[in-house]
Amino acid sequence: MDGTKRSNIKPGLRVNIVLKEDQRSGELTEGYVDKILTNSPAHPHGIKVRLETGEVGRVKEILEEE
């Protein structure tokens, strides 16, 4: 699923995000969405979220639950 549309993202969803400091390397961080921080309905670089761990970044992938 697409991480650039706010409507696809809900709290509790498992996602891969890219943290601000990892934008150059593209390293992804996996976690569960705690809060959606982007107000607009879409963002070309991904919707900004806070994970349950407190990390903030933009959603690159929405992971399917096993």
Image (cartoon, rainbow, N blue to C red):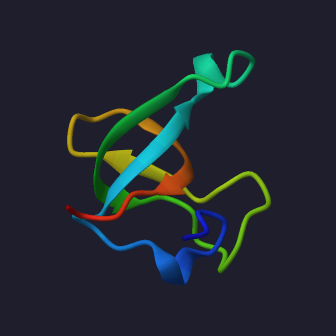
Q: Position of residue 32 (x, y in %)?
A: 26, 51
Q: Position of residue 19 (x, y in %)?
A: 54, 29
Find residue 47 and report its image quarter.
bottom right
In this picture, residue 40 sits left or right of residue 62: right
| Depth check, front residue: 54 or 29 | 29
Question: Which residue lies at the image location 59% right of the left edge and 63% below the top edge?
Answer: 3
24 versus 58 height, above or below? above
| Depth check, front residue: 12 or 54 | 12
Q: Position of residue 35 (x, y in %)?
A: 33, 59
Q: Outermost residue, front direction?
A: 66
Question: Which residue lies at the image location 61% right of the left edge and 69% below the top edge?
Answer: 2
Q: Outermost residue, right direction?
A: 44
Find residue 24 and report its image quarter.
top right
Find residue 53 and report its image quarter.
top left
Question: Which residue lies at the image location 24% right of the left edge and 64% below the top edge?
Answer: 65
On-image quarter of the C terminus: bottom left
Total numbered labels placed on residues in the image: 0
In this picture, residue 22 sits left or right of residue 10: right
Q: Position of residue 36 (x, y in %)?
A: 42, 63
On-image quarter of the N terminus: bottom right
